Image: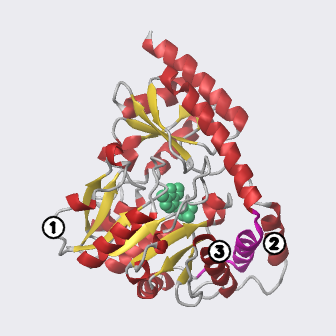
Amino acid sequence: MSQLPKPAYRLTNLQPYGFAIIGQRIQTMTAAGKDVIRLDIGSPDLPPPQPVIEALKQSSSNPVHHSYGSYTGDPGFRRAVADYYARRFGVPLDPATEVLPLIGSKEGLVNLSMAYLDRGDSAIVPDIAYPAYEAGALLAGASVITVHLDPANDFLPDLDSIPDDLSHAKMLWINYPNNPTGAVADIAFYEKAVAFCRDHNLLLCSDNPYCELVFDGYVAPSALQAAGAKDCTVEFMSMSKTYNMAGWRLGAAVGNHEALQNLLRVKSNIDSGHWKPIYDAGIVALDTTPQSWIDERNARYAARRERILAILPSIGLEAFKSPASLYVWARVLDGDDQYYVERALDEAQVAVTPGTMYGVGGAGHIRFSLGVAHDRLEEALTRLRVWYQVKVV
Ligand SMILES: Cc1ncc(COP(=O)(O)O)c(C=O)c1O
């Protein structure tokens, strides 16, 4: 019998991370000899640009690159992120005060919640959202005010529908290009969100890891392009999807200086910064990757997206076609996403993500990731087609 004390109260409402559960189940299936194809997880299958790998190798052979780094992150990486924002969005950032490197943007999302939320506070979180926004609030002992994302409103939150009494609310989370729907926002939306946050004394948290995963000529903006955004906004950028560096765990929070200082206060008590060679590789990614590399990578994702869209009607799904992100979001015609996902995994050995992982608003939907190699994707789609024909008979 266990001799351990009870875990902390904060775990009461915090569920295990959805992908951790799916991952365990897939491991068990794989150990039993099943060949599961993963269209669930949003992890790029392709490598980063070669100069990034070379930079890592070179920097890691430098004997003085193995000690602790600075809590505020590598100055060269902060400079490279600021240059990227100036070049790409026309947003000037002071690399010393308006850029804070992260060990992957996910830790920053959660640690920012720890910096701003107490018991009794709340965060406004879209219903259909990346789970870390809610998890951060729950870990901080705070609660969540949900705002529905309606396809009829292009999956943008209707800010006017948020209840008037926001006296306990401190943060508003937004994420465009959106995971899981692929929906996008324009600068007019960001201006509205900034005005809303200034009116209600909220921190606007713009999670923007998919801004370089775009199709059909679409160009994604940054929330920091909205007038006055820096007064109330932190944006999260990530190297994971932009440069296929998901495992490297490198990103940054940018924008409002005071909010970054508060985030740093939490982080510097928890982590000790990143490894210098990772920063050096990140600098090379930001400074030297040609747009043509991003365009060619996106063309591969676009081709995969077309293949998925083409077969959806034959497997009981109806898709939302979007101009960005790493995903296809689809409605299950007979309604139950969990049932669909369970059966696809058990009977076709294809893993897709149930919409309910992103909130109750995701019920009846599933998400496909584009981060899987062409031949595996084709095999998965063939399996799903055959499975669905058998399932409906
Ligand atoms: C919307 C969103 N935000 C943040 C992240 C975390 O990215 P990172 O790898 O930078 O931690 C993800 C990862 O899938 C994501 O989908």
Q: Pick whichever, 256 or 280, lies toward us.
A: 256
Q: Residue at x 46, y 83 (%)?
A: 260
Task: Tell how many labels.
Answer: 3
- The mark closer to the camera, 3 or 2, is 3
Question: Which quarter of the image is occupied by the N terminus?
Answer: bottom left
- In the rendered image, residue 251, in percent from the top left (x then y), is placed at 58, 70
Q: Which residue occupies 44% across, 30% down?
A: 318
Residue at 33% across, 48% down: 153
The residue under label 3 is which amino acid type? Arg
Residue type at tag 1: Asp
The question of residue 277 being in magenta is answered with: yes
The quadrant holding residue 361 is top left
Measured as percent of width and height from the top left, residue 48 is found at 74, 59
Q: Which residues are drawn in magenta?
A: 273-290
The picture places residue 367, in percent across and down from the top left corner, at 48, 41
Q: Is mark 1 within 8 Å of ligand 1?
A: no
State the mark number for residue 87.
3
Between 276 and 158, the residue placed more toward the observer is 158
Q: Which of the marked residues, 1 or 3, is nearer the chain's N terminus?
A: 3
Label at residue 100? none
**CA distance for labels 1 and 3:** 38 Å
Q: Is residue 222 left or right of residue 122?
A: right
Find disc 1 in the rendering and name its residue: 164
The verdict on residue 86 being magenta is no
Kindly tell me whether residue 7 is visible in this rendering: no
Placement of 79 over or under 295, stated as above or below? below
**In this view of the protein, which residue sits in the foreground, 151 or 235?**
151
Quadrant in which residue 64 is drawn: bottom right
Q: Secondary structure at mark 2?
A: helix
